[in-house]
Image (cartoon, helix red, strand yellow):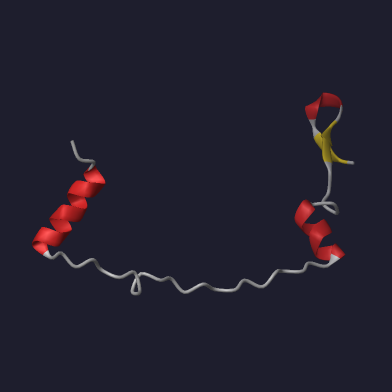
Amino acid sequence: MRTIQQQLQNWVKATKFMQRSNKHKKEAKTKRLKESFTERELRELMGVNRPVYRRSKGGAFRQR
């Protein structure tokens, strides 16, 4: 018994099937520039300088 690939090759020869080229499917590769953040911007993103709130007596939130 023949393999599927051999059967496909015979079918292509018999029907003179033309395969499409992949030239049109090529995607344009875009170059991404790496973002460089300053130390201040990184600290702001991490939330280092944000106010901190804690529960105190009576369950009220107070700034620490």
Name the one closer to the observer, 56 or 27. 27
Horizontally, residue 7 falls left or right of residue 53, namely left
Does 51 appear above or below 2?
A: below
Q: Quadrant of the C terminus?
A: top right
**Residue farthest toward the front in the current orientation of the protein:** 1
* Vertical relation: 42 (above or below) 51: below
Q: Position of residue 47 (x, y in %)?
A: 79, 52
Which residue is at the far right? 64
Quadrant of res 56:
top right
Instruction: Locate residue 7, reporting x and y percent.
Output: 18, 47
The residue drawn where x is 62% and y is 71% is 32
Which residue in the rendered view is the most extreme toward the top? 58
Give left or right: position of 39 versus 45.
right
Q: Is residue 48 above or below residue 2?
A: below
Q: Residue at x 35, y 69 (%)?
A: 25
30 w.r.t. 62: above or below: below
> Of residues 60 and 40, which is closer to you in this image?
40
In this rendered view, identify the residue nearer to me: 21 or 38. Answer: 21
Give the quarter of the image for residue 22.
bottom left
Q: In which quarter of the image is the N terminus?
A: top left
Q: Residue at 66%, 73% (x, y): give it.
A: 33
Residue drawn at (85%, 64%) of the image: 40
Residue 12 placed where, x, y %? 16, 59
In this view, the residue in front, 54 or 12, is: 12
Residue 60 image point, x, y percent: 80, 32
